[in-house]
Image: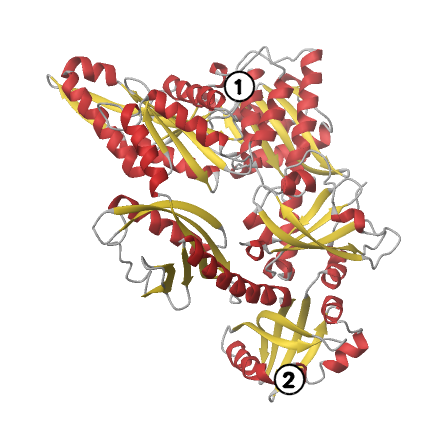
Amino acid sequence: MATELNMENLSSMIDNVIAGICFFEYENGEMTPVFINEGFFRMLGYNRVQGMKYLEKVERSIIPEDIPTYKQAIRDVLKDDGVVNTEFRTVTGSGGLRWLHVRGNLYAREGKKYTIVTIIEDVTERKNVEEELQRQAERLHILSEAEGEKIIDYNARTDVMIIRYNDEYGMAKDEIHSRYMARFDSSSIFKEDVAYYKAVLESLLKSPKHDTIEFRIRRFDDDFTWYQANLTSLLGAEGYVTRIVGRMININDKKLREMELLLRAEKDALTGIYNQGATEQLIHNAIEDSSENTLSALILIDLDNFKEANDLLGHANGDQLLEKTAEMLKDMFKGGDVIGRIGGDEFLVYMRNLTTISDADEMAGNIVKAVNYELEFEGEPIHVTCSVGVAVYPYHGKTYEELFEKADRAVYTVKANGKDGYRVYHAASTTVYHANRKVGYDMTKTLDYDRNIEDQVMQILFEDKVLESALRSSIELMTAKYHFHRGYICGNDSLPISRNIQFTVKQYATGKEADEHYELKRVVNEILYASFPGVTMIHDYDLTAEEMHEYFQAEGIKSMLYYPLTSKGEFQGAIVFENHEDVQMELSKSEMAEVRSLFRLMEANILQIGLMDRMQNFVAQIAVFDNMDSFVYVVNPDNYEITFINRKVVVESPNVKIGDVCYKALQNKDTPCENCILRNLDKNDSHCRCTEEIFNYSLRSWTRCSASWLECREENGLALLNSFDISEYFMG
């Protein structure tokens, strides 16, 4: 059994985290330490006795040049609801100089006595790297003089853009643009590229990342030149992006050759976008150039009722609809995306470099809303809409053929469900999304009865990154497979998960969701568990308890399949399926065995939700780990199971969940990492700590990861990991 994380581990976690967690009292101009964790003393190379003596006068621990910064931070935090976010230098136990980043807030105030809580991190390496980056920028400047490139250096604090390049005589020049984003001047950029260029800059300013864009810049003769810009945004000490740096390369000759080839035979004569052959080839090329760490989406658009409109209103009017749709797609997607017409009324878009799958989901919904043409023939309305299918690279396929097949199947599902909507492909998904509504889809239309249902549920749980959504799809699948009328998960107070994890065949809807139905929760969670502690098929004629019989009769329930959820012998809730017809439901012996296997599979995933909710409530009480600007998580080295994650992990990598194995969730690997930092921890040394630089494939960034043993009450079985994003240090 894995050692569990509980409230009693808190003190150990605070002491083992690779950062300083400190409480100070401020009164009459004096700052006095109240609580200092062991991590702070280790960070600066002091034992506790030395460290407390060192902090007797906090101001003496700061080098003189940084005292004004320290005093200003004090003035800031003493304001009502004040916060502190600053950096200054201090001396270590060995006499070295270290940069500290201090974040915190005013915790309490009593008269003239103030209590301040802070999180202190050693950012010396980041500071050193920033200096190195400056030196690299100078070297890039020299390089640009030799190679004719342009160097971009944008300062977000001052809103000043500097572009360094050589003029036609080989002389180094600096273009300085003040208030660059505030009064964005698009005159030097080609009109069709302006929105794309500005959107990329705004995205880079939101968070540290790297992006590559292609756009056109005006020359003195009013002609335009193609450039490729490789840009990187960098975090400043304040915790937000303060710089964008990079270089621009002249790619005009390359683009002109590409455009010449395209214009020859790759454009659709009617719409001006790519024809079928060109579209397919460009998508093939884009996929070949992609890595499995990038996300892209193939979006298939099929016009609904177009043939009717074309036949009744004439080809000229039909052509206008096709041209209008093509123009809409060109306005909607950015320059790097592939847009083509692949059939009479079919369009195809390959959307590149997605941040999340939600980007494609949102764009598909926007297409459905935009394609809404109200026409009329002899007084009768003709409504032309569209059905859209989406397949995502690399999840749904790694070739054009695989992605197109999945997108086409998604379109078929939309058409079968009434058209005018979109669907992101899912092997067993049951929901079709419409422009202004969301409706359930009949599972019997897509259910593969010849395929093992356990395999299908496993595929759902594996493919759907949102656990609640995967569980709901599984409930729908089982409802259709075994011909029930309603399925749901009903949790007790410690497992409040029923709202979105249920499915009801339309004609048997009660109007109340499971978590809103007090009587249902009471019957399922109290009465049934006392009578049926294991998986059971219950019929109304078998009931002996008057209270249960009345409930079944009131709800119209004739049969119920009941499976209690337990963790360590404690009841957590139940998985329930109901039948509301006069015919009593029965499952064969083999079906019951199948159902038990499915329930156990789902139970393992359901209990993750409760564990994560309880852990998040626990962490919220202390607010320490959630306020750290690093990825904090706890792993059991014996089975690599994640038992704790902080808010930083939840926000930056929402697919990672408690109960996942770390190498799969964090590194997208099927086996433990060859260079796993946990292997460097000595199990016989409870004080063992180690630090390594690791590339995180889930976050797609470089991290500095520190690992240490978490001392538990019973045994030392868990490892505490603290990981900082250092990806900007690797630019250039």
Left or right, residue 535 beside residue 75 = right
Disc with the residue nearer the chain's start (1 vs 2) = 2
Which residue is labeled 2 in the image? 59
Q: For mark 1, what is the residue?
A: 580
Residue 654 lies, with reference to residue 17, above or below; the image says above
Residue 399's spot in the image, x, y percent? 50, 24
Q: Check residue 224 in the rendering and tell me which mark sits there, or answer none.
A: none
Could you say whether the residue bearing mark 2 is in a helix, strand or loop? helix
Height in image: 315 above or below 24?
Answer: above
Question: Horizontal and vertical percent for residue 341?
Answer: 31, 23
Locate residue 598 relative to residue 219 in the image: left or right.
Answer: right
Measured Cα–Cα span from mark 1 to mark 2: 74 Å
Q: As rendered, which of 589 and 358 lies closer to the eye?
A: 358
Q: How is the image coloured?
A: secondary structure
Q: Which amino acid does label 1 sit on?
A: His
- Judged from this view, the residue extending furthest toward the bottom is 28
Amino acid at dot 2: Glu
Closest to the observer, 661 or 351? 351
Q: Where's residue 397, x and y in %?
A: 52, 25
